[in-house]
Image (cartoon, grey):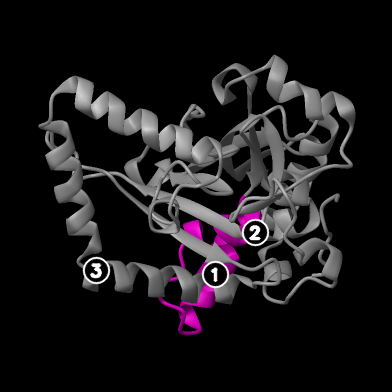
Amino acid sequence: MPERYTRRRMTDRKDGRRLRTVSPIFQLSPFAVRTPADAACSFTDSADAANLEAWLRSRRQEGTENMSLLHVIIAAYVRTLALRPAMNRFVAGRFIYARSGIDIVLSSGGSGTPDATSMSVNVRFQPSDTVYDVYRKINARVDNLKADQSADRLERLASTLVKTPRFVLRFVMSVMRWLDYHGWLRDSLTEKSPYHGSALITDEGSFHLPPVHHSLNSTGALPVTLSVGRIRGALELDKAGQLTERKYIDYAVTYDGRIADSAYVGSAFRYFRYFLMNPDALETAPERVVEDAL
């Protein structure tokens, strides 16, 4: 990163630097539209999955047995952020920040029973990561989580908090929101929080579901949710008028409209769609990494 981007300045946060050269309209938008829920925009799209399925089969045969669709989805989004860094912005304390890293929150559902609990995992990536880097980091993070007892401690802490009187719980949460508003929340909390990161990514297809539009929470700083459904087949007419079977992967996106305009978001997800359709492009590091504004 250039020196001017790494120097800490007043009003910068530990997890991001405040953007000062973006359009005044964007700088005013957090004051006019105060919560991510009010600024939420959403859309659905699909990509041809023929090359993606063939690529996954070939990589598994070559020895990367646990390579899954989710690894490719995350690698495609990481590469998208390397080329369209404004999608890695977030709003906090009425200011717009460029996140200092690529932090992906992975959400995993429970066992499907009424008392099942969901689990989230935060993984840090670099803009230059390839799909194999993503594969190794996710697997290593999951292995560390299984061996780490901090998740149990966090569960015990949550169990203790919910047993306290409501006014105590409300006070604790208000203090945490106030600290987060000013960027003073401890790293040990934000690094494990499902409400802080570059994006929340869920694989709904593993539960045989279509993509779901997840909401943006008013707590934390999470600008994008990306939900991916199962690969589906479709019968279509080709140019010769013959009935042909095609494969598609559907995904749903919800994003904070205060971080970028629709044209920018559209260009970002054109890249995302391209990488899903051409996963071999993710096997090497990007030729360039675009920096966000000052």
Q: Amino acid at mark 2?
A: Val
Bounds of the magenta segment: 49-77
Circles 3 and 1: CB atoms closer than 8 Å: no
Q: Earlier in the sequence, mark 1 or mark 2?
A: 2
Distance from Cα at disc 3 to Cα at disc 1: 18 Å
Circles 1 and 2: CB atoms closer than 8 Å: yes
In the rendered structure, the answer to whether residue 235 lies left or right of residue 179 reads right
Which label sits on residue 155? Answer: none
The overriding secondary structure of the stretch rendered in magenta is helix
Q: Provide the secondary structure element on which disc 3 rests.
A: helix
Distance from Cα at disc 1 to Cα at disc 2: 9 Å
Q: Badge 2 is on which residue?
A: 78
Above or below for 256 versus 251: above
Q: Provide the secondary structure element on which disc 2 rests.
A: helix
Residue with the most extreme front position: 10
Q: Badge 1 is on which residue?
A: 134
Whether residue 70 appears in magenta in the rendering, the answer is yes
Q: Amino acid at mark 1?
A: Val
Q: Count numbered badges in the picture.
A: 3
Instruction: Please state which of the two labelled residues, at mark 3 or mark 1, is closer to the viewer.
Output: 3
Distance from Cα at disc 2 to Cα at disc 3: 24 Å
Q: Badge 3 is on which residue?
A: 146
Q: Measured from the top left, where is residue 199 in percent x and y?
A: 56, 46
- The quarter holding residue 113 reads top left
Q: Measured from the top left, where is residue 136 in percent x and y?
A: 48, 76
In the rendered structure, the answer to whether residue 209 lies left or right of residue 248 reads left
